[in-house]
Image (cartoon, rainbow, N blue to C red):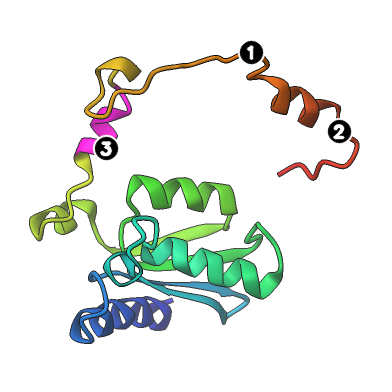
Amino acid sequence: MDKFMEMAVQLALDNVRGNTGGPFGAIVVKDGEIVGVGQNNVTRLKDPTAHAEVQAIRDACHFFSSYQLDDCEIYTSCEPCPMCLGAIFWARPKAVYYACTKEDAAKIGFDDQFIYEQLEVPHEDRQIPMMKVSPKNSDAPFQAWDCSSEKVSY
């Protein structure tokens, strides 16, 4: 376990030293083998979703040709942010291990607390207001999915 965490931390350090992204690294492991690797590439890729955990999940899912990480473990240099946490739950690994806490990240300018707080605010009162708009047949995709015999549930 320690060697995998050390690798995730080293990925984060290499990312900073190489000036290619934020101080975050993650790996996905199955049966003692690394099957996915990710570093924070938000600024390099100009993609706000390119967090280390998401990148590692994408890499591992590509490796397995699957959208789930059954029996896998994720090792990450820092406690996952809300977005990464959502991706982790959708990927369904069996465990996540992290080195630094979200409070440690906040001390260096990566503070996600406002996102946790915004989840509790009514949609229309959020920092970025969210309003429901229901055009005619807005539920047609859901109805089509529900009736489809070709759907792959996940």
Q: Which residues are magenta?
A: 114-120
Q: Earlier in the sequence, mark 1 or mark 3?
A: 3
Magenta span has 112?
Answer: no
* Label 3 packing within 10 angstroms: few (<14), some (14-19), many (20+): some
In front: label 2 or label 3:
2
Residue type, mark 3 in image: Ile
Residue type, mark 2 in image: Ser
Tell me where residue 5 sits by quadrant.
bottom left
Q: Residue furthest left?
A: 107
Work out whether 67 lies above or below 26: above
Task: Give the residue drawn at x 30%, y 16%.
Answer: 124
In front: label 1 or label 2:
1
Residue type, mark 1 in image: Lys
Circle 2 residue: 148
> Is the N terminus in the top left, top right, bottom left or bottom right quadrant?
bottom left
Task: Give the residue drawn at x 42%, y 63%.
Answer: 53
* Label 1 packing within 10 angstroms: few (<14), some (14-19), many (20+): few
Tell me where residue 150 sits by quadrant.
top right
Disc 2 to disc 3, C-alpha distance? 35 Å
Q: Is residue 15 left or right of residue 84?
A: left
Circle 1 residue: 136
